[in-house]
Image (cartoon, helix red, strand yellow):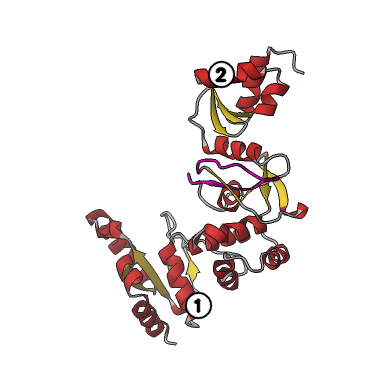
């Protein structure tokens, strides 16, 4: 046991875990059951889950909630699905429930912690950023059960771009997931993957890309950087270099005067470089995707 006073030892340990600590850790630090009860009553400990507490205050960062989820699923469980993808830096950090594959049965949590009941093989668990997480392939498979098509596609693309996804490992994970509901999102996303992954910034961009591929049209480059002399690079939403065609999908901000001026200047530069620029309002894409694809078929001459 540490030579520090028990309360100091507990506080130090909690700090290394971004403000969370478990009952077994408190007891191992020398904190008596009666003291734990008193700290709960006075607010020094705030209960997050059965035998799991925030130490000092309940305003946890996302790292704190991740560590709490790891402690709740200990000793052999792991964080999975969206939270694991966030830890792998495949998706932007969010604020929703944290999915875990627990070691055994898990009590109700009030919503912040969400258990997965699927078996977890030893080769599907690793350590990332000091946390027990599922592998990239298993995390994406679990994400598909509750995530969106854009989240699943983005996680796959980012895993490829970062060199984190082994296609054979992904094939094994998909095979183990036979019968799971997430396969209806995952299998089409895998089929549409490029060899190296892509940067797709919105669900609408992904819808257009997917519809183009489903229609048998050429795959566009997505958000590829084009360097302008002496200026910052630009990233068209969709680009077909061999057709000298650029497609931009304009959200509401493109109706603002300042942004319209930027768009006009950028389009003029593209035109001077021999590109054709076609712009679609996002509402047109969302509501009339078939007509957008028909327009692009004519532009591409196919």
Q: Which residues are magenta?
A: 94-111
- Quadrant of the drawing holding the N terminus: top right
Quarter-of-image position of residue 168? bottom right
Which residue corresponds to mark 2? Answer: 39
Say whether residue 101 is magenta: yes
Give whichever of discs 2 and 1 has the lower sequence position: 2
Nearer to me, 106 or 92: 106
Q: Residue furthest left?
A: 257
Which residue corresponds to mark 1? Answer: 213
Q: Helix or strand or loop: what does disc 2 sit on?
A: helix
List x then y, in percent, for residue 207. Answer: 44, 69
- Quadrant of the drawing holding the C terminus: bottom left
In this picture, is 73 found above or below 174? above
Q: Residue at x 63, y 43 (%)?
A: 106
List x then y, in percent, for residue 196. Answer: 61, 65
Q: Residue at x 73, y 23 (%)?
A: 28
Real-space CA distance between mark 2 and mark 1, rounded to the nearest whole angstrom: 59 Å
């Amino acid at each position: 046991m540490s030579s520090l006073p028990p309360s100091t030892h507990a506080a130090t340990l909690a700090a290394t875990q971004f403000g969370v600590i478990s009952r077994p850790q408190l007891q191992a630090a020398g904190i008596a059951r009666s003291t734990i009860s008193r700290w709960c009553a006075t607010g020094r400990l705030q209960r997050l889950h059965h035998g799991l507490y925030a130490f000092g205050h309940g305003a946890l960062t996302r790292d704190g909630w991740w560590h709490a989820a790891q402690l709740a699923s200990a000793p052999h469980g792991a964080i999975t699905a969206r939270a694991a993808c966030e830890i792998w830096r495949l998706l932007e950090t969010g604020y929703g429930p944290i999915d875990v594959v627990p070691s055994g049965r898990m009590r109700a949590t009030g919503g912040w912690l969400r258990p997965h009941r699927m078996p977890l093989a030893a080769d599907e668990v690793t350590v990332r950023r000091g946390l027990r997480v599922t592998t990239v392939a298993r995390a994406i498979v679990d994400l598909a059960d509750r995530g969106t098509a854009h989240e699943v596609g983005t996680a796959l693309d980012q895993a490829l771009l970062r060199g984190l996804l082994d296609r054979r490992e992904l094939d094994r994970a998909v095979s183990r997931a036979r019968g799971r509901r997430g396969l209806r999102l995952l299998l089409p996303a895998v089929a549409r993957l490029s060899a190296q992954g892509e940067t797709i910034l919105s669900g609408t961009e992904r819808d257009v890309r997917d519809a183009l591929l489903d229609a048998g049209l050429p795959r566009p480059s997505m958000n590829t950087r084009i360097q302008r002399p002496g200026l910052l690079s630009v990233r068209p939403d969709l680009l077909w270099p061999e057709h000298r065609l650029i497609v931009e999908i304009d959200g509401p901000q493109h109706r603002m005067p300042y942004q319209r001026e930027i768009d006009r200047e950028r389009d003029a530069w593209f035109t001077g470089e021999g590109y054709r620029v076609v712009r679609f309002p996002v509402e047109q894409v969302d509501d009339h995707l078939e007509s957008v694809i028909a327009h692009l078929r004519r532009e591409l001459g196919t």
